[in-house]
Image (spheres, rainbow, N blue to C red):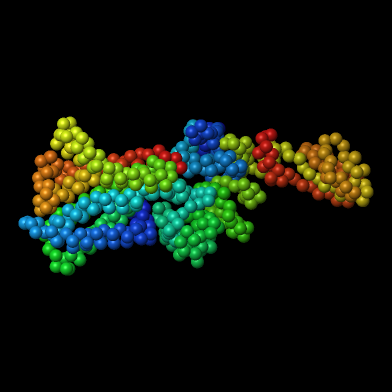
Amino acid sequence: MKLLWTLALKEIRDGMRNRWIAAAIVLLGILALALSLLGSAPTGSVNVSDLDITVISLASLSVYLIPLIALMLSFDALVGEFERGTMMLLLTYPVTRWQVIIGKFLGHLLILFIAIFAGYGGAILIMMLLGGSMEGWQSYSMMMLSSLLLGAVFIALGYLVSVLVKERATAAGTAIGLWLLFVVMYDLLLFGALLIDKGQLIGQQLFAMLMLVSPTDSYRIFNLSMFEGVSQAAGIAGLASEAGMSGTLLLTVMLLWVVVPLATTLLVFQRREL
Amino acid sequence: MVESDTASNVITLQAVSKRYNNETVLHDVNLEIQSGECIVLVGHNGAGKTSLLKLMLGLTRPSSGSVEVLGRNPAFSAAVAQRLALGYLPESVAFYEAMTGREVLTFYAQLKAVNASECEKLLALVGLGDAAKRRVGTYSKGMRQRLGLAQAMLGNPQLLFLDEPTTGLDPVLRQHFYELIDGLQKEGATSIISSHALNEVEARASRFVILKEGGVVASGTLDELYKQATLPVHVKVIVKPGEASNVAGRMGAGVTISEVNNQSFSLSCFKEEKMPIIRHISSLGEVVHDMQIMPPRLDELYTHFMNGDA
């Protein structure tokens, strides 16, 4: 456990030193603040608090930003150390390979935790000081937590890329490709297929399934429909429950997206010769 | 092979081969290293020195044969605890550039559960005390190498693996470097050094292992290697001016004469003819002024084994 902490702390220190954490906090904080300030404008409707509106716009943006930040943190984590030769030395120390992976993962997760909670949490604090209402804080907190989970998914995916490719440049390219695929392409393809299909083959069940397998869609659905206030404001009230998606199911899907890539990374890494 | 011999070995390699794709980098290597030895691996670049070290460190697995370090297969995760007793200085060592020298060493010390106070001692010992708070990215090659040595010495290792340890070090540092290694050696550490700076390691090697194209072509103490190699001894004979060619002509069979000039000539002969020829020269009387006997040099020995006429 102490070893894991040593390994994690090294990543956190790296993150602080190259201003990663600071940049991410500022970025997320400014976005959250801007969206909550702007978001207050269209709140003319009933039952909807400022925070619920903020959750909608922030979740829609987080779905782009968090994976990007997570991938940028993680794509270099293994291939970079292979390339520079630091991994070779590290593995002659009394650490197992799984400890190396889990240690790094914990470190990167903590960086993301700090960024999300300082950025989004800080914005909320400022809103509160400005006299904003705290109604809907539950959905906002869940949004922060699920953002961390979404980040964990892409840290794990980044590691998988990092352990599979031979060069850092390839890892960077693949990470961008992965981001495009999960964040942009997947939904486009899905909706395209839906348009062409005109409801003949893809029924509601299949569509729900296809949405569910994507970690980004799971995140979106979770945040937009799990809380009544939010789902009303988002105009998708009851959508998720009709499709049989519970919050637990959505979070489980995301959790699987963390565990499977991480375990695969570990398997590949165990066999790897340096 | 006697059972108890294997038991006292720190490292045992049996019929070890290593292939990457279709390229054989090591073939049929047998090696036994006992506690307290200082083994020097010699060979050209690409002869398999680093590959051999990596196998012993458990970074790679043999394609066939077995590797045992401190009684265990080093590539198994069960061997993790044994790495506490192990120090490694890779060839052209790389560190986390953004960290300071002190942070790097402390990081490694924590992994080995070594006290932070030892880091300060080691930093001072390798002469990095003042540079400890600078980023490793700003370090020169020599400073990196010294930091590399400091990390290899963490926790007083029983087993030291040093891959080309003195490349990039100036002569003064080299001397200092070997003093540090000697210190560990005196405490009973076993060390395996890969090097092609033969004259540097000559005095402290208990045994040489000469590698060529992935195979061990010779191994043994310096004396044993000289015996195996049957290299000629050179003798320079200085005689009365004008008598050189005359005296040279009386040297007899089994001797090669060269560099004849007015008052000296050189001859080379094999070890068994050395004493008879020296006696013969002494018996020649006043005409011979002086005689210099030069045993085969280390680089001759190296060239001999490298040229493959072993």
Picture quarter containing residue A25? bottom left
| Vertical order, A87 against B30 (above or below) | below
Residue A17 visible, this orientation: yes
x and y percentages locating residue B256 in the rendered image: 82, 39
x and y percentages locating residue B295 in the rendered image: 75, 45
Q: Is residue A220 left or right of residue A26?
A: left
Q: Is residue A258 left or right of residue A174?
A: left
x and y percentages locating residue A229 in the rendered image: 10, 53
Q: Residue at x 17, y 53 (%)?
A: A56
Front one among B84 and A131: A131
| Vertical order, B273 against A140 (above or below) | above
Q: Is residue B57 left or right of residue A130?
A: right
Q: Is residue B217 left or right of residue A154?
A: right
Total residue callouts: 0
Residue A97 visible, this orientation: no
In the rendered image, the residue lying farthest to the left is: A46
Q: Residue at x 58, y 52 (%)?
A: B167
Q: Residue at x 49, y 37 (%)?
A: B67
Q: Residue at x 90, y 46 (%)?
A: B244
| Vertical order, A185 against A229 (above or below) | above
x and y percentages locating residue B276 in the rendered image: 83, 40
Front one among A154 and A81: A154
Picture quarter containing residue B175? bottom right
